[in-house]
């Protein structure tokens, strides 16, 4: 049986700067010196592994003893993996097959040639990993600027050409008929007793088909994916706060959340697409318009989170006084902690500064259950003084109120960064941190006062005092979000120490 040379060529991507299959064959033919040869070509395959059809056919021919030499244009055409190439080279030697690279001249029959070959393979693998990293970096950079990164187009949208920073991309455009169905789905799921199954049944019974499936059918998984997707929300500051509370990485400033754009949610490589937790994931404002108002979207999204027993709870779900209680000595926020005492779980408030550095002599620990009971009693007594209450609910349509809320979020973000530096701070830096936090807290108090003054002017509706009293009479039956809403009506801030507290009322 006459042996022949095997010319192997591979091209992963057809680019201007890459050498074509035809050019590779032409280079390799010169090495045959007019002898017999066969070509094996794989186009559109990466060199990171050996799962390539023509390559495997060539290897079968080698194992049958038909091949004299394997000729390639360049070493990385056959493999970019050190492990794979070493296994291949061992097999080549086993069947007496020589290896020839047209552009990297070495003799595999000598020890020096084999050593050089291994060095080249190492650098080929390094190049592959460098390319992978560059691709990943480019992907992350473009995704965080709002570029369209591919994937299934969400129900309710179509894809249209778009330009960002002078570069061509695409964005979602609303399909009005489908958008109405999206609003219906979110409005239904935002109701406490409505399940995914209820929505599917309603859509089927009313002849509302899904234009994105062949049979027009809906299913629970598709509805669930829609509810979790921030692409639909008209993202405002409430959405910003929601993701911030969840520990999500936000790549836009609070002032960008103006209640019009949807959002993209990206997971890190290790998080996985089906990750329940939002902590560590990335949210970017998208260039398209949202469909669902933020209040409805948040009710649906929070319900979805709370339905997952393994989901990371909101920070505010440890107490309905979250964000309201400050240390009466240093002005730092009180944070809540838990400890197990025999068979009971005890919650207590502690000064965040004391917890971090032990430099505050104020709050060392306030029993949360007892403190909440005292505040509830104060709220009940305070409401008795009114026949009607002016509702201090923030109207986000007012640009001034939106501006103040943005400033409050910026202050909170700056305080968080300062507190994170406390553990490594020396005395000089600590003095600066204390001074700056006091300044920020004082400014935040002014902004909150401005909100309390502006909000009643923007709202002519007055809440039913009797209903508010009824809420507090049935306090234990309310969910924590409802409790927080009642507190927001009444209280601006609470200054507390272990022996006393002072409530600053909103009304």
Image (cartoon, rainbow, N blue to C red):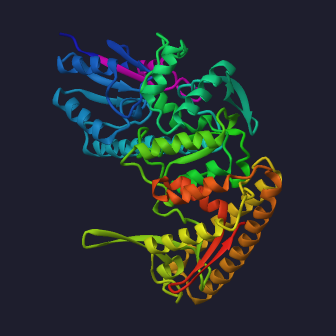
Residue 344, image x and y in percent? 30, 69
In this view, the residue in front, 173 or 149, is 173
Q: Judge from the rendering whether residue 10 lies leftward or rightward of residue 53; answer left or right.
A: right
Q: Compared with residue 402, is residue 49 higher up or lower down, i.e. above or below?
A: above
What's drawn in magenta, residue-wise?
A: 5-30
Say which quarter of the image contains residue 254: bottom right
Residue 246, image x and y in percent? 51, 54
Which residue corresponds to the image point at 53% horizontal and 52% vertical from the top-left? 248
Q: Judge from the rendering whether residue 346 lies leftward or rightward of residue 181; answer left or right.
A: left
Q: Judge from the rendering whether residue 314 lies leftward or rightward of residue 158; answer left or right.
A: left
Q: Quadrant of the N terminus?
A: top left
Residue 333 visible in image: yes
Q: Compared with residue 220, is residue 357 higher up or lower down, i.e. above or below?
A: below
Residue 118, image x and y in percent? 32, 44
Let me know if residue 271 is in the magenta part. no
Let me know if residue 14 is in the magenta part. yes
Q: Compared with residue 269, is residue 76 higher up or lower down, i.e. above or below?
A: above
Residue 365, image x and y in percent? 45, 80
């Amino acid at each position: 049986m006459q042996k022949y040379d095997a010319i192997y060529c591979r091209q992963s991507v057809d680019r201007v700067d890459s050498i074509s299959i035809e050019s590779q064959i032409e280079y390799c033919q010169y090495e045959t010196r007019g002898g017999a040869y066969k070509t094996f070509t794989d186009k559109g395959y990466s060199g990171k592994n050996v799962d390539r059809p023509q390559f495997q056919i060539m290897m079968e021919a080698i194992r049958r003893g038909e091949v004299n030499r394997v000729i390639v244009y360049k070493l990385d055409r056959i493999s970019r993996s050190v492990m794979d190439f070493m296994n291949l080279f061992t097999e080549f030697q086993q069947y007496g097959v020589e290896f020839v690279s047209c552009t990297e001249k070495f003799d595999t029959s000598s020890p020096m040639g084999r050593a050089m070959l291994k060095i080249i393979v190492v650098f080929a693998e390094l190049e592959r990993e460098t390319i992978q990293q560059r691709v990943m970096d480019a992907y992350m950079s473009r995704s965080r600027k709002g570029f369209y990164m591919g994937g299934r187009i969400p129900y309710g949208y179509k894809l249209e050409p778009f330009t960002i920073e002078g570069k061509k991309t695409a964005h979602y455009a609303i399909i009005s008929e489908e958008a109405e169905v999206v609003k219906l789905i979110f409005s239904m799921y935002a109701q406490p007793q409505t399940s995914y199954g209820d929505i599917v049944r309603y859509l089927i019974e009313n002849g509302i088909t899904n234009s994105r499936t062949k049979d027009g059918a809906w299913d629970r998984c598709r509805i669930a994916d829609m509810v979790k997707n921030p692409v639909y929300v008209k993202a405002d500051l409430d959405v910003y706060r929601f993701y911030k509370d969840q520990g999500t990485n936000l790549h836009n400033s609070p002032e960008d959340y103006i209640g019009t754009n949807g959002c993209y949610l990206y997971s890190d490589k290790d998080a996985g697409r089906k990750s329940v937790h939002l902590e560590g994931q990335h949210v970017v404002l998208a260039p398209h318009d949202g469909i669902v108002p933020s209040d409805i979207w948040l009710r649906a999204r929070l319900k979805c989170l709370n339905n997952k027993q393994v989901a990371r709870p909101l920070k505010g779900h440890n107490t309905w006084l979250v964000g309201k209680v400050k240390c009466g000595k240093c002005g730092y926020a009180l944070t809540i902690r838990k400890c197990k005492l025999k068979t009971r779980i005890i919650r207590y408030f502690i000064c965040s500064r004391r917890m971090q550095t032990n430099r505050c002599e104020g709050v060392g620990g306030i029993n949360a259950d007892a403190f909440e009971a005292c505040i509830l009693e104060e709220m009940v007594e305070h409401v008795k003084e009114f026949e009607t209450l002016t509702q201090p609910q923030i109207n986000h349509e007012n640009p001034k109120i939106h501006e103040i809320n943005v400033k409050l979020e910026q202050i909170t973000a700056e305080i968080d960064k300062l507190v994170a530096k406390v553990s490594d701070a020396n005395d000089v830096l600590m003095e600066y941190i204390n001074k700056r936090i006091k300044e920020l807290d004082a400014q935040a108090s002014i902004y909150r006062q401005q909100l309390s003054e502006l909000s009643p002017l923007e709202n002519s509706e007055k809440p039913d005092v009797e209903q508010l009293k009824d809420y507090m009479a049935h306090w234990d039956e309310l969910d924590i979000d409802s409790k927080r809403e009642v507190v927001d009506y009444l209280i601006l801030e609470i200054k507390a120490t272990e022996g006393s507290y002072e409530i600053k009322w909103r009304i």
